[in-house]
Image (spheres, rainbow, N blue to C red):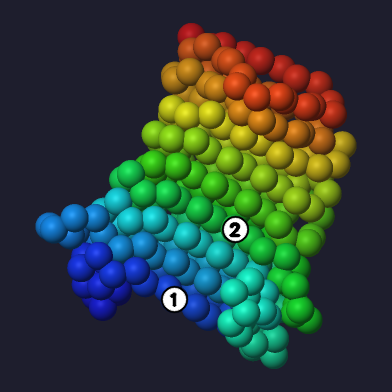
Amino acid sequence: PDTVTTLLSAGTNVVMQANNDITVSEAITASNSGGDGGDLTLQAGRSVLVNANITTDNGDLSLIANDTTNNANGSAGVVDAQRDSGAAVITLASGTTMNTGTGAFASEIKPGTGKTNRTSGDITLSNITAGSLVATNSGPTSGSDIVDNGALTISGTSSFTTSASNGTIVIDSTTNAFTGAVSLNTTGSTGHVVIDGGTTRLNIGQSSIGGSILLTTGNTITDSGTVTVGGGMSVNTDA
C-alpha cells in the first residue's frame, strides 16, 4: 500500500477498481502535513474485504461492492465475465479501524445491474470514526443486511438503508456514539432495525422501516423527522 499511502498523503484522490474482489491486507495511513489527505475509493465487481486499518487524514473513504457494468458517468464498469459467482459483501474485519477524521465514510453494495452473477450479502462495519456515515445495501438478494462488529463514532449524520425485501439493520455496539441524526430505511415485514446509541443522545431522522425497531441508549432518544414503522417500536434508555 506504499504507493496509495504516498498519494493520499499528498492530498491526491485515489480510485482503485477490480472486476472481482478488492482485499486490503496491510494498513493504509495517510498523513498530509500541508492539509487533508486525499479521498480513497475502492470499487469492486464483487466484494470489498478490509483486513487492516485505514486512516485518511480527513479524506473521504468510499467502499463499493457489486458494481455495475456501466457507471452513471457513462464510463465502462465491471467486465461481466470476470465477476465470479458468490455473494457480494463489504466486510471490515473485526478489530480493524477506519478513521476518516472529519471526512465522510460511505459503504454501498450496488444492485450489480448488467451482470450474470450479482447476488449480494451483508455490509459488516467495524470500528469507524468519521465526520459522517452512509451505509447502503442495494443488493438484489433478499435479506442483504447491515451489521456491525465494532463501535461507530460519527460526529455528523448517519444513514443506514437496505433495499432488498427483509434486509435488516443491526448496529448494536454498546459504545456507539452518534452525534448527528440517524436515518434508517428498510422494506418488508421482517426488515427489522436495532440501534444502540451507547451513552450518547440518539436522534432519529427521517426514516421508513418495514419491520420493527428497537432503540437503546444511555441518554435521551428524540426524533428530527417523520419516522414510519411497519411493525412495533421499542425504546430503552439504559442510563
100 displayed left or right of 70 = left
Q: Earlier in the sequence, mark 2 or mark 1?
A: 1
Above or below, comparing residue 205 to residue 19 in the picture: above
Q: Crowding at label 1, few (<14), some or many (≥20) Cα neighbours within 10 Å? A: few
How far apart are labels 2 and 1 at the CA level?
A: 15 Å
Which residue in the rendered view is the most extreme toward the left? 33
**Residue drawn 75% across and 41% down?**
186
Residue 55 visible in rendering: no
Residue 111 percent location from the top left of the image: 73, 65
Q: Secondary structure at mark 1?
A: strand
The three-letter amino acid code for the residue at tag 1 is: Met
Q: Crowding at label 2, few (<14), some or many (≥20) Cα neighbours within 10 Å? A: many
Depth check: 161 or 197 in front? 161
Above or below, comparing residue 56 to residue 23 in the picture: above
Residue 18 percent location from the top left of the image: 53, 80
Above or below, comparing residue 193 to residue 130 in the picture: above
Q: Are marks 2 and 1 in contact (CB under 8 Å)?
A: no
Residue 205 percent location from the top left of the image: 61, 28
Q: Quadrant of residue 154?
A: top left
**Residue drawn 48% across and 18% down?**
201
**Residue drawn 43% across and 35% down?**
156
Which residue in the rendered view is the most extreme toward the right? 189
**Residue drawn 83% across and 49% down?**
165
Q: Which residue is mark 1?
A: 16
* Count of numbered badges drawn on the protein: 2
Residue 14 percent location from the top left of the image: 37, 72
Which residue in the rendered view is the most extreme toward the bottom? 81
Give me the disc on residue 178: none
Q: Which residue is mark 2?
A: 108
The three-letter amino acid code for the residue at tag 2 is: Glu
